[in-house]
C-alpha cells in the first residue's frame, strides 16, 4: 500500500498558514479537537473514513438525529442560511476539522505514519480519534509461523524444529520467550539431527510458503480483521463464564471484535503492560505425512506448547520474585531462586526432562503465564496429502456436502503444564506425548480421559472439511487432537491457494471453523487475564493496606514513601506503596476491557481510580511537588523528556489528548507517588473517560462529564492560584521582615505587584474556562442542534433575532441542551468576571451596570409622548458610542482569539456577551428551561438598552414578554412590559407602542401596576390614538377593555352546533322572524380613568359567510356582515363594569353569529372577535314566523256517482301575502274543472288536477274559489278498497306584519319572503253509515235467548236514529216486550261512536224445517235536514242457531238415573256386601214432548213397554250375586229399588263398582211385527271408594243347593 498522503489541500493549507500568521488567529484547543473528533464519529454522515472526501468545515452534519436541514422548497436542495458576522467566530472550527481529516488520513494509511514534523494539535487529533498513540481498539493474537522468513534473513526449515524466525521483541522486558526455538543452542540441534537421514519432505518443507502473510491477507480482505457475534458464556465451566466477571451491564455476546494478528510477538512481564500481550497464540503447522509429524512437527509444537504453559510448574514461593525480576529464566539468579524454593540443585523436573529429550529448555518464568496459554494449531496439509485433500474438498464442495465447524476442538481451561513421565521417559514414534493442565482435574470427568474427550468432541460437532479429506490427513488431524487436547485444532488447507481473495465453499467451511475457534480462544484468554489482573490488584491493595498501617503512627502528614533516603525533600523507601504502579496496572485492566469492546467496564476502572484518589488529592500532591521542587525548573514538571515527540508536546497536552503511551511514560518517570504528574492526571482521566463514553455511544454523558471536569478544574486552578499567592506572600513578608529599614510603601508596593500577578493568573484561568465552555458547545454542534437559524433580512438592516425554539423533540436532545446551557451560563459568569478583572476595582463592568436593579434610563424624568415626538423629529436617537474605558487585561496568545478580541473595547465586550447570552437562550429553550432563557433575555435587552439599540432591545423583549405571563409572575411581567414600552417610545414605533400600552392594562396586572405608571401610560395611550398612523391597522382584542355578549330577550330554546373550522361550539338561541330581540354588551374597563369613545358596533354575520371568512383570512369586515347594530356617540366608558344594549327585529330567517364587537376610539378601532375570545360563541337561529293564514274546504264528503259543488275559502290572517297558487288534485274516480267553466265545455274540461293562481292579499282579507267535482258510482278490481279523495294545496309567499314599518327605517337589508303550504282534503263515503262491529246471542233461560248487536257510525257528520227492527228466522222470535233499545230514539250519533242494541227472544217449535234466512237489523237514520237513510245490516248469529239445532237432535233420547247405595264402607275379601240400585224413571219422556205440552205420563201415550235391567261386574273388583237381572214394571212407580250382593275379590281401596243396564223390551204391533224402541241412557252415581281388608282365617258352611238365599 502507498505511504500516507497529505490530506490538507493547498487552499486549506494556505488559509491555515495565513490565519495562523495573523495576530488574531489562534489554534483550536485540544479539548475542542478531542470532543469534535468524538462527536463527528458519532454522526452518521460525519467525516468520511477515507479522510479525503470529508465535508467542508462549514457544512452542518445534518444526518445526526438532532440536526435540522434548511431545505429550499423550490429546488429541493439543502441551503445554508446566510449568517451575520459574529464576534465569536474564528477559524478554529475549520482548523479543527482539517486536523481531524488529517488524522483520519494518517490512520487509514498503511505503514508507520511520520509524525516528527507534525504539530501537537495534529498528534492530539490522532490520539483523540483512537488511531494513534496507543490504540486499544481490538485484541492482539500471536502467530508462530515456521514457514515465514524472518527479518534477519533466516529461512525456517521444518526439519529443524528449533529454527524459528528471529523477530525483534515488541515492547518486551528481559529475554525472549522463544529463545530456544530460534536455534541459539546450535550444537544441541546438530547433535539431535545428525542421526536423522534426509527425507523427501525435508526439501519440500524448506520451501518459503509464507503462510502468515496469506493468513493475514485473507483475514483482512475477506473478514475485515473482525470477528462477529462472539459468545462470552461458557456453560461447561463457570470459571470461564465472562458475564460473571462483568460489573456494569452483563452481556452474553459481543457484536464485533477487531483482531490484530502479529508475527511471533514477545511476552511482556510487567503487569502494567499486560494489555500489550496477545490473548492467544496461533501455531501454523505444515505436515506432509505421519512420519513427518512424528519426527519434526510434533516435537516442535510440543516445545511451543510447553513454553507458553511453562509457568504452571513454578512453585508459589517463586512467583512474586519471578514477576518482579527481568532476568532470563536460565540465568544464575533464576537457578538460585529455584534452588531456594526447595528443589534439589541440579535435579530436573519432569517437564525439563521431556524438553531435554527433545533438545529444548523448559522455561519456568512468569513470562509464559502472563503471555497466555490459549493456543490454536492451524494444521496445513502439504505434499500428496494436501493434493488428495484438495481434490476431496473440491468434490465435496461441488456436490454440496460438508459443513459445520470442521474440526472444532474445545480446549481445556488452565494455565501451567505438567508433562507426563510415561511419555517423556521413552519417546517413541508410536506413542504420543500428551500435555495436561494443572486445572484439568476440575473440569469434570469428561476431561480426565483424552480419548473419551476426543470421542465426545468428534460426536458433538458435524463433520466439516475433515470429512472430505484423505485417510492420511484424517489420521494426522486425529493425532493433533489427541496429542494436544488443551488447545484447539483446525484445518486450513486453503492457505496454500494462490488467490486469497476468492471465496469457495471449502474455504468458507474452513474459515468458519477457524474464526469460531479463534473467538473461543480469545474469550478464554480474556478470562485468564482478568483473573490475573484481579490477583495482582488484590496483592497491591493488601500491600497498600500494610503500608498505611505501618506509617499511620509515624507521620502526622501525608507521606507516600516510607523511611529511607531523602530526595527533593521527600522520603522514599523501596518498601513503600508504589502508587504509580497501582495506577498503571489499574489502567492496563481498563485497556484490556477496551480491547474487548467493553467500554463500560473500562470506564468503571477509571471511576474506581477517582474514588481511590479524588481530584483534591491530586491537587495536594501537585502542591507538595511544587514545594519540593523549590523553584527548580526541571522541565517545569519534574519529568525528564527522553522522547523527541513527547518533548514536543507538553504534559498537559498529552493528558488532554489522551495519549496513553506517552503519558504512561511520564507516569513511570515521575516517581512512585505520581507527584510529578499529579496535576495532569485528572485531565488525562477525563480524556480517557470521554473516549470510552464515545465508544459507548453516550454523547450526553460526554457533555455531562465535560461540564463536571471544567467546573472542577476551574475551581482547582483558582485554589492553586490562591495557595500560591499565600505562599509567595508569606515568603515576601519573611524577606521584607529581615530588612528592618523597609517602609510600609514598599510593603504595599510588593503586595500590589503580587496582587496584580494573581489577578493576571486568575484572568488566564477565567479565559481558559470561558473558551473551554464555548469549545464544548462548538464540538457538540457536530451532533446536536445548538445554534438558532440566525439570518439577516433582505434589506440587510436588521438581524432577525426572533428564533424562539421549542424543546428538543427527544429526551437525549433535551439532556444535551441542558448540559450545554449550564456550561454557557458558567461561561457567562466567567466573561463577567473577566470584565471585572480587566476594569479593576474602581470601574464598573458595563454588563453589571446594565443589568443592575435600577437601569440608568429609568432614573431620568418621564417625557410625555407628544413632547418626545417633537424631540425625536429634531434629533433621531443614535447608538451610544463605546466608552473610552481602558482594559488592563492581557491574555496569553494561547487563549482563543475571540476571547482576546472581546476585550479590545467595551463595544466588543458587550457584543461578546450578547452573542454568548443569545446562544445560551436558544439552548435553554431547547432544554425546556424557558425560565432560565427568559432571565437571560432580560439581561440581553438591558445591555442593548444601555447601548442605545432600542429597536433590537424591543425585539428581544417582545419575544420574551409573555414568559412571565405564562408563569403568572405578575410583577416581573409588568416590569418587562414597562421596559418594552420604554424602548418603543424612544424608538418612535407608534403601532408597537400602542399595542404594548394596551397590554399593560391587564386585569392581572392592575393589582401590581403603580398608579403613577398607569396614569402616565394612559396619557400616552390617549395621545397615541389621535395619531393618524393608528387608523389603518385593524387592532384586535386588547385586555384594557373586556367585552361579553349576552341575549336579554326570551327565546324559544337553545341548542349547540360544532364548528369544525374553529374547533369550537356555537350556542344558538331559537327565535322567529318579527321577534324583538335585545342584546346586552358588558364592557369591563381596566383603565384608571374614564374614556369617551366614538361608537360601539356589533357585527351580525350569517353562518355560511362566517365560515368563508375564517377559511379565507379570519378577519370579519363590514362587507362580510349581514347587519351591523350600533350605539351612537357620545359613549363614556367608566373604569370597571359598563353595560350597553342593542335591539333588533329580524325580518329574514337564517343562522346568524354575533361575530365581532367594534369599539371606535378616536382614530383607532378595536375589534373583539368572538372566535378569538375565550368565551362562548353566541349565535341566533331565526326561524320563519308562524303563518296566520287558513283555508276552508266544503262539503265535508262527497256522494259517489254525483256531481257536487266544492268551495275553497282562503283567509290571509295577519300576514302580508305577496302571491301564491291553489292546486286541486283528484284521486282515481274523481275529476275537477277550473272555476267559471262554461257549461257547454264542461265535459271537455274535466281533469285530475287544476291550478288556480292566488294574487297578493293584505292582512285580514278573504278569497273564495268555487268549482265542480264529479265522482264515479262504483269501482271494481283491486282498487275497490281505495279511498277517493280530492286534495287542495295552497302555497303562499308572505312577510311579517311589521315588515313595512321596519323597512321604512332603512336599516334592515332586503330579504326573500317566507313561504308556507296549507292543505285540505275531502273524500267520498266508501263505507256504510253504520257498520256491524259485532253480534252475539246466549241462552239465559230454558227457552229464552238474549241477542246483542254493536254498530259503529262512519258518517263524517252527526245523524239521528229514527227507528230500527230485528228480523230473526225460526226457531227464535222477539218477545213482545223484548226490544230493550227505547232510549236510542232520536239520539245523535257522531262519527266513530258505537251503538249497542239488545233484544230478548223466545224459542218456538213452530216448524221442523230449518230456515235459510239470515238475521237482519234495519236502522233508519235522519240528518239535521230531516232526510232519512235506511241501513240494512245483516247479523251473524250462526253460533246460537247451531246450538239450538243440536238440542233438537238430542231431544228424542230417553234418560234415566241410577244411584248405587252400599250399606257398609269396608269389609274383608270374600265377605258379601249388600248393595241397592235406586232407579229414577221419570225422565224417560223426551224434552220435545214436554215443550209440546204433551202428557208426561207414559201410560197416556199408550201401552208402556216393559223395562229389562241387568247388573254386571265386568271391569270391576266385585263378584255379584242375588237378582242381578229382571223386569221392571214402570206403571207402578217411577222410583224402583233393586237390591243385590257383591263380594270383593281383592284387598285395598276399591273404586270400581258393578254397573246396571236398562232397556225397553220390543213391543208387538197390531200387524204382528216388533216395533223399534229407543235406547235408554242411564246416568249412574256410585260411592267414592270401598275399603277391602284381607282375611286371616276362613269359616265355611256347606248348604244344599236348593235352599233359598239367606
Image (cartoon, grey):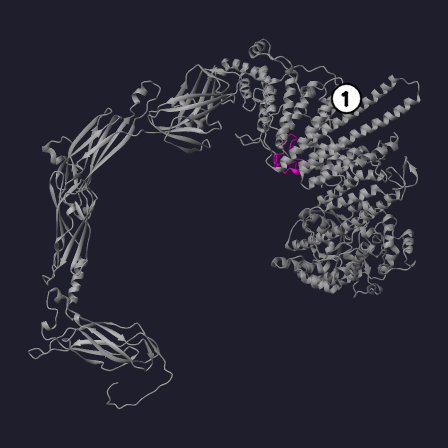
Picture layout, residue 1571 above or below residue 476 = below
From the top left corner, tell me how far across and down residue 1498 is, in percent. Answer: 12, 72
Residue at 74% in and 65% down: 451
> Does 61 lie within the magenta span?
yes
* Closer to us: 1173 or 308: 1173
Q: Which residue is depicted at the point 76% across and 31% down? A: 715
Q: Hey, which residue is sitting farthest left in the picture?
A: 1567
> Label 1's element?
loop
- Report which residue position mark 1 lands on: 890
* Residue toward you, 309 or 861: 861
Quadrant in which the C terminus appears: bottom left
At x 81%, y 23%, the residue is 757
804 in relation to 1344, above or below: above
Q: Where does the magenta region start and end?
A: 42-66
Tell which of 873 and 1387 is nearer to you: 1387
> Where residue 246 sits in the image (x, y, percent)?
72, 48
Q: Can residue 85 be seen in this snapshot? A: no
- Left or right of 27? Residue 1269 is left
Q: How many marks?
A: 1
The image position of residue 134, as x and y in percent, is 76, 41
Where is residue 646, by image quadrant?
A: top right
Question: Is 625 placed left or right of 224 in the picture?
Answer: right
**Residue 428 drawn at (x, y percent):** 81, 65
Residue 321 appears in the figure: yes
Which of the 4 image quarters holds residue 661? top right
Q: Quadrant of residue 71?
A: top right
- Is residue 580 magenta-colored? no
Amino acid at each position: 500500500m502507498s505511504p500516507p498522503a497529505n490530506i490538507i489541500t493547498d487552499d486549506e493549507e494556505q488559509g491555515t498558514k495565513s490565519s495562523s500568521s495573523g495576530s488574531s488567529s489562534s489554534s483550536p484547543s485540544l479539548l475542542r479537537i478531542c470532543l469534535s473528533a468524538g462527536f463527528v464519529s458519532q454522526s452518521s454522515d460525519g467525516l468520511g473514513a477515507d479522510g479525503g472526501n470529508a465535508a467542508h468545515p462549514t457544512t452542518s452534519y445534518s444526518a445526526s438525529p438532532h440536526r435540522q436541514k434548511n431545505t429550499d422548497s423550490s429546488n429541493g436542495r439543502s441551503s445554508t442560511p446566510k449568517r451575520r458576522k459574529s464576534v465569536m467566530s474564528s477559524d478554529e472550527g475549520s482548523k479543527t476539522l482539517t486536523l481531524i481529516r488529517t488524522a483520519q488520513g494518517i490512520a487509514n494509511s498503511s505503514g508507520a505514519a511520520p509524525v516528527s514534523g507534525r504539530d501537537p494539535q495534529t498528534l492530539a487529533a490522532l490520539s483523540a480519534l483512537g488511531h494513534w498513540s496507543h490504540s486499544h481498539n481490538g485484541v492482539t493474537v500471536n502467530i508462530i509461523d515456521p514457514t515465514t522468513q524472518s527479518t534477519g534473513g533466516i529461512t525456517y526449515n521444518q526439519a529443524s524444529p528449533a529454527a524459528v524466525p528471529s523477530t525483534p521483541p515488541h515492547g518486551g522486558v528481559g529475554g525472549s520467550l522463544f529463545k530456544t526455538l530460534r536455534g541459539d543452542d546450535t550444537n544441541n540441534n546438530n547433535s539431535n539431527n545428525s542421526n536423522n537421514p534426509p527425507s523427501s519432505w525435508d526439501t519440500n518443507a524448506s520451501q518459503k510458503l509464507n503462510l502468515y502473510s496469506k493468513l493475514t491477507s485473507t483475514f483482512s480482505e475477506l473478514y475485515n480483521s473482525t470477528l462477529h457475534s462472539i459468545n462470552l458464556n461458557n456453560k461447561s465451566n463457570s470459571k470461564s463464564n465472562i458475564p460473571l466477571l462483568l460489573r456494569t451491564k452483563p452481556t452474553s455476546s459481543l457484536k464485533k471484535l477487531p483482531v490484530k494478528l502479529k508475527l511471533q510477538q514477545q511476552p511482556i512481564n510487567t503487569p502494567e503492560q499486560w494489555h500489550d500481550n496477545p490473548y492467544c497464540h496461533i501455531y501454523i503447522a505444515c505436515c506432509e505425512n505421519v512420519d513427518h509429524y512424528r519426527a519434526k512437527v510434533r516435537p516442535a509444537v510440543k516445545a511451543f506448547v510447553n513454553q507458553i504453559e511453562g509457568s504452571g510448574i513454578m512453585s508459589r514461593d517463586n512467583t512474586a520474585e519471578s514477576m518482579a525480576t527481568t532476568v532470563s529464566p536460565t540465568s544464575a539468579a533464576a537457578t538460585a531462586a529455584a534452588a531456594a524454593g526447595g528443589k534439589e540443585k541440579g535435579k530436573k523436573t519432569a517437564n525439563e526432562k521431556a524438553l531435554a529429550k527433545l533438545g529444548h529448555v523448559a522455561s519456568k518464568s512468569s513470562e509464559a503465564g502472563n503471555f497466555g496459554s490459549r493456543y490454536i494449531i492451524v494444521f496445513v496439509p502439504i505434499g500428496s496429502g494436501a493434493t488428495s485433500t484438495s481434490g476431496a474438498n473440491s468434490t465435496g464442495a461441488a456436490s454440496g456436502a460438508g459443513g459445520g465447524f470442521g474440526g472444532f476442538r474445545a480446549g481445556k481451561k488452565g494455565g501451567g503444564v505438567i508433562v507426563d513421565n510415561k511419555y517423556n521417559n521413552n519417546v517413541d514414534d508410536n506413542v504420543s506425548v500428551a500435555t495436561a493442565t494443572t486445572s484439568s482435574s476440575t473440569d469434570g470427568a469428561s476431561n480426565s480421559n483424552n480419548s473419551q474427550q476426543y470421542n465426545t468432541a468428534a460426536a458433538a460437532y458435524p463433520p466439516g472439511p475433515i470429512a472430505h479429506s484423505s485417510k492420511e490427513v484424517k489420521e494426522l488431524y486425529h493425532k493433533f487432537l489427541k496429542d494436544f487436547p488443551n488447545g484447539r485444532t483446525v484445518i486450513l488447507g486453503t492457505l496454500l491457494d494462490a488467490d486469497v481473495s476468492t471465496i469457495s465453499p471449502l474455504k468458507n467451511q474452513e474459515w468458519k471453523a477457524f474464526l469460531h475457534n479463534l473467538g473461543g480462544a480469545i474469550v478464554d484468554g480474556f478470562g485468564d487475564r482478568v483473573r490475573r489482573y484481579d490477583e495482582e490488584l488484590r496483592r497491591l491493595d493488601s500491600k497498600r493496606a500494610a503500608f498505611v498501617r505501618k506509617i499511620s503512627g509515624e507521620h502526622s502528614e501525608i507521606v507516600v514513601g516510607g523511611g529511607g533516603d531523602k530526595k527533593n525533600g521527600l522520603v522514599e523507601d523501596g518498601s513503600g506503596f508504589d502508587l504509580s504502579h497501582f495506577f498503571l496496572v489499574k489502567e492496563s485492566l481498563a485497556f484490556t476491557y477496551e480491547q474487548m469492546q467493553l467500554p463500560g467496564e473500562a470506564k468503571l476502572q477509571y471511576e474506581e481510580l477517582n474514588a481511590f484518589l479524588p481530584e483534591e488529592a491530586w491537587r495536594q500532591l501537585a502542591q507538595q511537588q511544587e514545594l519540593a521542587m523549590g523553584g527548580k525548573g526541571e522541565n517545569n514538571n519534574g519529568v525528564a523528556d527522553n522522547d523527541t515527540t513527547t518533548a514536543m508536546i507538553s504534559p498537559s497536552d498529552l493528558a488532554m489528548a489522551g495519549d496513553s503511551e506517552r503519558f504512561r511514560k511520564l507516569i513511570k518517570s515521575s516517581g512512585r507517588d505520581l507527584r510529578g504528574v499529579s496535576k495532569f492526571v485528572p485531565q488525562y482521566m477525563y480524556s480517557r473517560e470521554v473516549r470510552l463514553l464515545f465508544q459507548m455511544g453516550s454523547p450526553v454523558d460526554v457533555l455531562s462529564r465535560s461540564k463536571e471536569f471544567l467546573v472542577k478544574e476551574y475551581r482547582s486552578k483558582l485554589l492553586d492560584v490562591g495557595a500560591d499567592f499565600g505562599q509567595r506572600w508569606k515568603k515576601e513578608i519573611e524577606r521584607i521582615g529581615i530588612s528592618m529599614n523597609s517602609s510600609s510603601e514598599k510593603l504595599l508596593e510588593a503586595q500590589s505587584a503580587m496582587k496584580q500577578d494573581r489577578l493576571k493568573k486568575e484572568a488566564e484561568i477565567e479565559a481558559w474556562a470561558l473558551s473551554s465552555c464555548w469549545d464544548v458547545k462548538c464540538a457538540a454542534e457536530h451532533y446536536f442542534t445548538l445554534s438558532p437559524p440566525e439570518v439577516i433580512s433582505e434589506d440587510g438592516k436588521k438581524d432577525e433575532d426572533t428564533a424562539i425554539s421549542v424543546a428538543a423533540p427527544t429526551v437525549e436532545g433535551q439532556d444535551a441542551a441542558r448540559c450545554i446551557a449550564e456550561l454557557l451560563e458558567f461561561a457567562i459568569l466567567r466573561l463577567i468576571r473577566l470584565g471585572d478583572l480587566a476594569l479593576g476595582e474602581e470601574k464598573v463592568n458595563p454588563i453589571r451596570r446594565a443589568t443592575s436593579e435600577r437601569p440608568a434610563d429609568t432614573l431620568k424624568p418621564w417625557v410625555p409622548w407628544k413632547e418626545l415626538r417633537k424631540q425625536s423629529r429634531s434629533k433621531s436617537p443614535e447608538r451610544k458610542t463605546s466608552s473610552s474605558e481602558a482594559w488592563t487585561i492581557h491574555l496569553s496568545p494561547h487563549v482563543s482569539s475571540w476571547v482576546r478580541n472581546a476585550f479590545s473595547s467595551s463595544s466588543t465586550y458587550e457584543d461578546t456577551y450578547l452573542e454568548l447570552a443569545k446562544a445560551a437562550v436558544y439552548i435553554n429553550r431547547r432544554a425546556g428551561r424557558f425560565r432560565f432563557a427568559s432571565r437571560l433575555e432580560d439581561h440581553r435587552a438591558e445591555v442593548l438598552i444601555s447601548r442605545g439599540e432600542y429597536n433590537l432591545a424591543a425585539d428581544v423583549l417582545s419575544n420574551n414578554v409573555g414568559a412571565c405571563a405564562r408563569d403568572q409572575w405578575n410583577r416581573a411581567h409588568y416590569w418587562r412590559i414597562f421596559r418594552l414600552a420604554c424602548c418603543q417610545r424612544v424608538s418612535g414605533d407608534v403601532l408597537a407602542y400602542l399595542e404594548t400600552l394596551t397590554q399593560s392594562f391587564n386585569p392581572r396586572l392592575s393589582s401590581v401596576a403603580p398608579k403613577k405608571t398607569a396614569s402616565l401610560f394612559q396619557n400616552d395611550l390617549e395621545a397615541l390614538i389621535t395619531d393618524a398612523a393608528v387608523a389603518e391597522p385593524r387592532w384586535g382584542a386588547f385586555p384594557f377593555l373586556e367585552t361579553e355578549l349576552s341575549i336579554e330577550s326570551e327565546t324559544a330554546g337553545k341548542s349547540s352546533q360544532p364548528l369544525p373550522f374553529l374547533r369550537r361550539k356555537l350556542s344558538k338561541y331559537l327565535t322567529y322572524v318579527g321577534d324583538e330581540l335585545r342584546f346586552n354588551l358588558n364592557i369591563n374597563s381596566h383603565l384608571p380613568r374614564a374614556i369617551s369613545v366614538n361608537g360601539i358596533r356589533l357585527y351580525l354575520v350569517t353562518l355560511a359567510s362566517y365560515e368563508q371568512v375564517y377559511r379565507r383570512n379570519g378577519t370579519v369586515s363590514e362587507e362580510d356582515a349581514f347587519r351591523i347594530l350600533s350605539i351612537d356617540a357620545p359613549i363614556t366608558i367608566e373604569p370597571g363594569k359598563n353595560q350597553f344594549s342593542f335591539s333588533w327585529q329580524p325580518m329574514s330567517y337564517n343562522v346568524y353569529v354575533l361575530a365581532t364587537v367594534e369599539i371606535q376610539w378616536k382614530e383607532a378601532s378595536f375589534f373583539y372577535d368572538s372566535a378569538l375570545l375565550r368565551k362562548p360563541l353566541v349565535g341566533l337561529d331565526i326561524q320563519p314566523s308562524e303563518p296566520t293564514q287558513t283555508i276552508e274546504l266544503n262539503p265535508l264528503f262527497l256522494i259517489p256517482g254525483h256531481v257536487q259543488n266544492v268551495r275553497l275559502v282562503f283567509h290571509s290572517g295577519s300576514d302580508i301575502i305577496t302571491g301564491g297558487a291553489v292546486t286541486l288534485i283528484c284521486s282515481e274516480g274523481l275529476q275537477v274543472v277550473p272555476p267559471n267553466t262554461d257549461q257547454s265545455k264542461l265535459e271537455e274540461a274535466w281533469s285530475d288536477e287544476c291550478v288556480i293562481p292566488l294574487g297578493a292579499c293584505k292582512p285580514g282579507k278573504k278569497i273564495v274559489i268555487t268549482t265542480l267535482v264529479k265522482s264515479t258510482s262504483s269501482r271494481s278490481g283491486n282498487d275497490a278498497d281505495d279511498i277517493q279523495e280530492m286534495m287542495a294545496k295552497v302555497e303562499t309567499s308572505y312577510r311579517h306584519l311589521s315588515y313595512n314599518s321596519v323597512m321604512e327605517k332603512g336599516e334592515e337589508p332586503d330579504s326573500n319572503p317566507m313561504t308556507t303550504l296549507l292543505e285540505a282534503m275531502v273524500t267520498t263515503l266508501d263505507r256504510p253509515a253504520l257498520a256491524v262491529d259485532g253480534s252475539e246471542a246466549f241462552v239465559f233461560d230454558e227457552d229464552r235467548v238474549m241477542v246483542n248487536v254493536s254498530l259503529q257510525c262512519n258518517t263524517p257528520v252527526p245523524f239521528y236514529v229514527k227507528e230500527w227492527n230485528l228480523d230473526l228466522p225460526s226457531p227464535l222470535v222477539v218477545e213482545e216486550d223484548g226490544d230493550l233499545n227505547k232510549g236510542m230514539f232520536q239520539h245523535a250519533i257522531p262519527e266513530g261512536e258505537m251503538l249497542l242494541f239488545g233484544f230478548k227472544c223466545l224459542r218456538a217449535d213452530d216448524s221442523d224445517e230449518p230456515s235459510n234466512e239470515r238475521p237482519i237489523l234495519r236502522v233508519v237514520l235522519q240528518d239535521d235536514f230531516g232526510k232519512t237513510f235506511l241501513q240494512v245490516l245483516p247479523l251473524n248469529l250462526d253460533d246460537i242457531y247451531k246450538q239450538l239445532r243440536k238440542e233438537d237432535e238430542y231431544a228424542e233420547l230417553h234418560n234415566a238415573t241410577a244411584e248405587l247405595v252400599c250399606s257398609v264402607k269396608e269389609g274383608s275379601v270374600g265377605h258379601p256386601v249388600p248393595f241397592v240400585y235406586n232407579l229414577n224413571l221419570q225422565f224417560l219422556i223426551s224434552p220435545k214432548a214436554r215443550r209440546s205440552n204433551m202428557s208426561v205420563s207414559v201410560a197416556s201415550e199408550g201401552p208402556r213397554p216393559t223395562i229389562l235391567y241387568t247388573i254386571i261386574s265386568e271391569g270391576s273388583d266385585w263378584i255379584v250375586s242375588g237378582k242381578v237381572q229382571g223386569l221392571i214394571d214402570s206403571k207402578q212407580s217411577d222410583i224402583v229399588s233393586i237390591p243385590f250382593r257383591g263380594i270383593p275379590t281383592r284387598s285395598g281401596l276399591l273404586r270400581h263398582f258393578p254397573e246396571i243396564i236398562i232397556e225397553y223390551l220390543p213391543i208387538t204391533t197390531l200387524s204382528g211385527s216388533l216395533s223399534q224402541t229407543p235406547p235408554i241412557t242411564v246416568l249412574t252415581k256410585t260411592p267414592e271408594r270401598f275399603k277391602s281388608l284381607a282375611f286371616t282365617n276362613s269359616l265355611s258352611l256347606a248348604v244344599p243347593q236348593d235352599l233359598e238365599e239367606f
